[in-house]
Structure formats: structure tokens, C-alpha cells
Image (tube, rainbow, N blue to C red):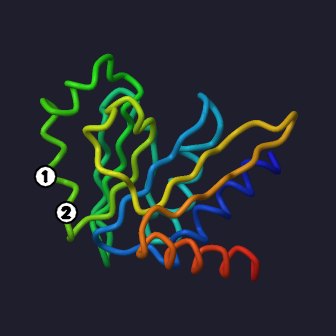
Amino acid sequence: MPEEAATLRLGEALAAGASKGLVLHLKGELGSGKTTLVRGLLRALGHGGRVKSPTYTLLEPYGLLRLNLYHFDFYRFKDHSEWLSSGFREHFNPESLCVVEWPERAGDLLAPPDLEILLQYDGPSRNALPLSRSEPGQAWLATALSRWRSS
């Protein structure tokens, strides 16, 4: 349970710098906390409803007050070409915040993210390893880390 609370707090910290046009990739084994992190992010952005993993639907859209967030899960992709035929490309635009679980399943067809977080097990606990991949991603990570340290 402490790991879940910490993962939720990380998602909440990410909300501080979240803005339109950003892309976040979440990587890690099954059960490592990817959807939990998204739940914390969405709650901090003002979403009071249920947050479920889009493992079966592939996409869960959230219309929030200040932005549209699209939560993708590509775990069920069997082949990179499924990204091409999915129709999801249109959601990756300057007006949306996109969060992608299992981005590696789309291969190199998916553009690099602004921020990538690897969630991994470390014995009984979990680690989150963030990596910015763009200038906006650096600013987003700096804001999130500042919020994380002050909480």
C-alpha cells in the first residue's frame, strides 16, 4: 500500500506541469503502477470519476477543465501496424495531453515523448525513473520534482 500512495503522489506532482501538447510514456511490467500514476494525475487535474485501465478499450478520453487528456494502453497490440490502423494519431496534437502505457508496442511509429517514466520493482518496493526527452519535458519534470519534494 505505501507504494500505491507514493505512485499516486507522483501522478499528482505531474499535474502541476501538465499542459496541452505534451506526451508522457509510461513503461514497466504488468502491475508496476502505470494506471495508478495516471489516476493520481487525473485526480490532481480535477477528475473526480472512476479511472480505469484502457487495456481492453485501448483509449480512455478525459475532458478536463483545462485540457483534454487521452489515456492509451497499447499492451494488446500484437504488431506495430496496429498503431497505423488505430486512428489514434489525431489525438496527438497541440490541444491534448497524451499518456501512453506500453508505448513500445507501437514501435518506432510513435513519436518520442516529452517525458518517459519507467516504473520498476525493486524487491518489495517500486522505483520510478523519469527521463525528459524534450525541452517541454524538462520543464514538466522540473515542476513535478519541485512539487514532489515539497509534498
Numbered circles on residues, count: 2
Circle 1 residues within 10 Å: few <14, some 14–19, many ≥20? few
Label 1 element class: helix
Residue type at mark 1? Glu
Does 124 sit left or right of 30 as displayed? right
Residue displayed at 31% across by 53% down: 70
Which image quadrant is residue 7 in?
bottom right
- Please say if 75 is above or below 147: above
- Please say if 54 is above or below 19: above
Q: Are marks 2 and 1 in contact (CB under 8 Å)?
A: yes
Circle 2 residues within 10 Å: few <14, some 14–19, many ≥20? few
Residue beneath disc 1: 90
**Residue 75, image x and y in percent?**
41, 27
Label 2 element class: loop
Residue displayed at 82% across by 38% down: 122
**Residue 22, image x and y in percent?**
35, 66
Q: For the N terminus, which image quadrant?
A: top right
- Please say if 127 is above or below 73: below
Front in this rendered view, residue 95 or 39: 95
Which image quadrant is residue 73 in?
top left
- In the orientation shown, which residue stands out farthest toward the top? 78
Residue type at mark 2? Asn
Residue displayed at 61% across by 71% down: 13
Q: Which mark is residue 118?
A: none
**Residue 126, image x and y in percent?**
77, 44
Residue displayed at 22% across by 56% down: 92
Q: How far is mark 2 from mark 1, CA to CA?
A: 7 Å
Front in this rendered view, residue 5 or 114: 114
Q: For the C terminus, which image quadrant?
A: bottom right
Residue beneath disc 2: 93
**Residue 37, image x and y in percent?**
58, 53
